[in-house]
Image (spheres, helix red, strand yellow):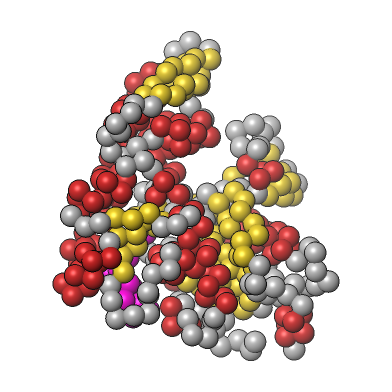
Amino acid sequence: MFNKIFGYFSHDIGIDLGTANTLVYVKGKGIVINEPSVVALNTKSKQILAIGDDAKKMVGRTPANIVASRPLVDGVVSDFEVTEQMLKYFIEKVHKETFSIFPRPRVVIGIPSGVTEVERRAVEDAATNAGARQAFLIEEPMAAAIGARMPVQEAAGSMIVDIGGGTTEVAVISLGGIVASRSLRIAGDELNEDIIQFARDEYNLLLGERTAEDIKIAIGSAYHLEEKLEAVMRGRDLVTGLPKAITIDSDQIRQALAKSVGAIVDSVKMTVEETPPELIADIMDKGIFLAGGGALLRGLDKMLTLSTKMPVHIADDPLTSVVRGCGLVLEDIDSLKEVLVATQYEKAPR
């Protein structure tokens, strides 16, 4: 009863609960929050000091008693209580400007397609404990396809590759369901690790995570670039222990990323192999769509085109595809209900 009353004063929201970033879509308003999925915690008092942008500034710069960490690893909840606090923070932030004292929104959350029942339940429970009166779950590749305005409910094949921070989701969708899919725990974070490993092996240089990500964004590529790019890699020399700076180019970084990029390409090819021939014909006509932050890696579309012999397109604003998909489901939840994952709260009173 109270949930229903508080629900009238709440904004229904869609959340892309990503390993690297959390994006929040508010019904009728659009995307209002895009912040890193990072929480800074005082290990002595168990008190949460900062969430989102403020917490990300602390990564690698905290004293021993403060830990700035990500509560989600590879797209799934690794720290339940901290995830709950983070969701609560985002729900309350959305309702700050309204008169809602106890926000009780309906929430649509994107989850990786390969998660177990336990991992799915963890996300659901975290959302309801954080204040959601109803938690709906949608698989990320489905949300990304809806966000990219693909005709997911038609009897035609649509193929999406969503490369996020922790997972790469590959899916072929038809009639509102996933026909063939692969969930790979190699994505943006793994590419950063490849750069850190490359610096250590080649130059005895210890890099920080943020530095590796900056280099990936600045000069990272999956395919040979016509114009070679350069960047300065700064870190600590593992031999002398002193600071060291080295200039590297895009060819070296491409070599460093080759193994992980190859794994992503292979998972796309395997999914194509499992797809019924009728749907392959549709995909050859429409092409494969790339979404997520990894879609912005230079030359990845060319690499996939060569490997699959099919056209590859990058979705408009690939970073927000999943949360826009969650938002479109929120706006018309009745007609898009079939794309949602069955949950324990589905039959809860509205």
Residue 176, percent across and down?
A: 37, 79
Q: Residue at x 48, y 61 (%)?
A: 321
SS assignment for the magenta stretch, majority: strand
Taking the view exactly as shown, the residue that stands out farthest to the top is 240
Residue 336, percent across and down?
A: 47, 81
Q: Residue at x 67, y 34 (%)?
A: 62
Q: Residue at x 30, y 33 (%)?
A: 225
Q: Nearer the viewer, residue 22 or 242?
A: 22
Q: Quadrant of the N terminus?
A: bottom right
Q: State yes or no: residue 153 in magenta.
A: no
Above or below for 344 versus 65? below
Q: Which residues are magenta?
A: 169-182
One can see residue 270 in this view: yes
Q: How many marks?
A: 0
Q: Nearer the viewer, residue 230 or 271?
A: 230
Q: Nearer the viewer, residue 87 or 284?
A: 284
Above or below for 18 versus 144? above
One can see residue 115 in this view: no
Above or below for 215 versus 294? above
- Left or right of 305 on screen, residue 121: right
Residue 79, percent across and down?
A: 57, 55
- Left or right of 108 on screen, residue 284: left
Q: Quadrant of the C terminus?
A: bottom right
Quadrant in which residue 332 is drawn: bottom right
Q: State yes or no: residue 172 in magenta.
A: yes
